[in-house]
Amino acid sequence: MMFAFCRRIVFLSFFGLMCGTLPFAAGDEKVRFNQHIRPLLAERCLECHGPDAENREADLRLDVEKEAKQQAITPHKPQKSELYLRITSDDPALLMPPPETGKSLTAKEIATIRQWILDGASYEGHWAFQPIVKASPPPVSNVQATEIDRFLLAALDKQGMTFSKPVSRQQWIRRATFDLIGLPPTWAEVQDFVNDKSSEAFEKVIDRLLASPRYGERWGRHWLDIARYADTHGGSAIGFTRFPFSYTYRDYVIDAFNRDLPYDEFITQQLAADQLELPKNDPALAGLGFLTVGMQYRNPHDTIDDQIDVVTRGFLGLTVACARCHDH
């Protein structure tokens, strides 16, 4: 499959109940740094004990594991960890965060930090750079729940809650059709689905929508936004700039989504289709529009800089703009 959301099972999950992350409590799964601790540190501690050297207090960094464990955290021993002693202190002069900041920790948040230290105070890198692993569905009260529903139901079970009642078939096909192709279903499509009592009724709707040309138009536009595409003319620092054949890139993207083009090929064609020794009129060459339909500047180096920016933001989710001036 080309993109994760192209997978039928993920699309089906869009129509279910979505649950946020719940606070840690005794008896829950192991405290995770990224899920439970990092947000607390970011909100309550890092303004004074983070990366900003000019405003750092007591020369203490809590966002860097080595420094934090040298000064404030003793793994497995909360009572010997300065961090824990400070957040539980009865002395207003020692209590952290300081009372006057209005950022005091709740009892549950303190318990979370304590448990994290007891578990070894393990840090984790940014979630975006963690290797992808397949999670096993957790045990839940409803043993007949699907795999996706089991993840959602696990969070609800902890709160003594359950799913809302299923929507009607009319509502479901309306939601599915808007989600996948951005258009409402026709009357005939609604009636066909409502009257289809087969076990494959839902699957047939999803397959039909994924096979629709409208699917590529609906979802391809999001990639076109990343590529800073416009049908009329591109952004320009040198006046009105026309891209009369920009539509070929638009059509390439829509077709790629509709054909479920493998993602590695999708990337390669947009970055280096001209190096693939393709026939002169091969449609894949239009993928190079990713690099060429953007901003145009009088200084060619600025145009190249914009191309680098769209590549790194689009494919890595990061910017390397600083490297233009700072290569150290």
Image (cartoon, rainbow, N blue to C red):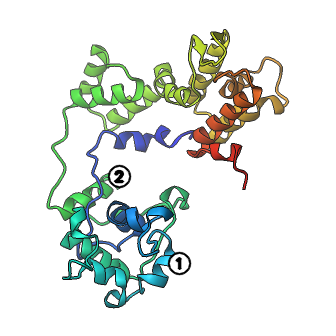
- Which mark is in front, 2 or 1? 1
Which residue extends farthest right? 277
Residue 31 is situated, as x and y percent measured from the top left of the image, at 35, 72
Q: Which mark is residue 249?
A: none
Compared with 116, 141 (above or below) is: above
Task: Decide which of 21, 236 is in the foreground and name it.
Answer: 236
Residue at x 82% of width, y 27% of height = 278
The alpha-carbon separation of the residues under discs 2 and 1 comes to: 38 Å
The residue where tag 1 is placed is 66
Residue at x 64% of width, y 46% of height = 322
Task: Decide which of 110, 193 is in the foreground and name it.
Answer: 110
Where residue 251 sits, quadrant-wise, is: top right
Q: Is residue 213 left or right of residue 93?
A: right
Res 262 visible: no
Compared with 268, 195 (above or below) is: above
Q: Which mark is residue 148?
A: 2
Residue 302 is situated, as x and y percent measured from the top left of the image, at 70, 30
Residue at x 30% of width, y 66% of height = 139
Q: Is residue 313 left or right of residue 71?
A: right
Res 193 visible: yes
Where residue 313 sits, quadrant-wise, is: top right
Q: Amino acid at mark 2?
A: Ile
**Label 1: element kind:** helix
Residue 176 is situated, as x and y percent measured from the top left of the image, at 33, 30
Total count of labels: 2
Disc 2 crowd, CA 10 A, few/some/many (<14, 14-19, 20+):
some
